[in-house]
Amino acid sequence: MSLVRRAVPEDAPEVLRLRQVMIDSVFAADGSRDWHTESLPTLRARLGEPDGDFAAFVVDHPERPGALAALVAGTLEYRIGKAGNPHGRIGFVFSVATDPDARRRGYARACMEELLQWFRERGAGQVDLTASAEAEPLYASLGFARTKDPLMRVNYPSL
């Protein structure tokens, strides 16, 4: 039996906690958690949509009941098709985190494998993610490769 399971609405506070772990480690953010309260209802609702375009897979923490050890989350997007992906379905992995005291146990890999299977079952022709230097070996072992995609971004203030 796999340790990995699909996250449910009750996992939302722990999903946010692990997302913050990822944000703090990758972006060296200020550690502010003020946004968690506002985000929680939306996340709970999205975790309650089993047939939607969002999925999160988790591993329960083996030493801390009620806590999560690992998280992987992603979305399925549509873009106009192209060669190699004529239907335009693209998976995007946007949050991979393991609790610091649960690392090096294969939890992130197991969660990633479940998410990648979820994308395949939904017809994704490609899966994208951004990788930190320390996580790149894991993603490379799962078949990911660096691209020349010139990503740009604009941020809008909260509504």
Image (cartoon, rainbow, N blue to C red):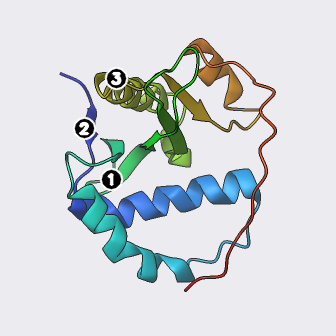
Viewport quadrant of the C terminus? bottom right
Q: Around disc 3, counting alpha carbons within 10 Å, would you say few (fewer than 14), some (14 to 19), or many (20 or more)?
A: few
CA–CA distance in space, label 1 to label 3: 28 Å
CA–CA distance in space, label 2 to label 3: 13 Å
**Label for residue 53?**
none
- Figure quadrant of residue 149: top right
Amino acid carrying label 1: it is: Arg
Amino acid carrying label 2: it is: Arg
- Circles 1 and 3: CB atoms closer than 8 Å: no
Residue 70 locus on image (x, y percent): 43, 43
Q: Nearer the viewer, residue 45 or 103?
A: 45
Residue visible at 58% across and 16% down in the picture: 83
Mark 1 residue element? loop
Name the residue tied to disc 1: 64
Say whether disc 2 or disc 3 marks the residue closer to the N-terminus: 2
Residue visible at 69% across and 18% down in the picture: 145
Residue visible at 81% across and 27% down in the picture: 148
Q: In the rendered view, would you say 68 is above or below 116?
A: below
Amino acid carrying label 3: it is: Gln
Q: In the rendered view, would you say 157 is above or below 1?
A: below
Q: Number of labelled discs?
A: 3
Q: In the rendered view, would you say 8 is above or below 105?
A: below
Residue 12 locus on image (x, y percent): 32, 63
**Label for residue 117?**
3
**Label for residue 5?**
2
Can I make out residue 3 in this image?
yes
| Left or right, 102 with reference to 132 | left
Q: Around disc 1, counting alpha carbons within 10 Å, would you say few (fewer than 14), some (14 to 19), or many (20 or more)?
A: few
Q: Nearer the viewer, residue 51 or 31?
A: 51
Mark 2 residue element? strand
Q: Nearer the viewer, residue 9 or 1?
A: 9
Mark 3 residue element? helix
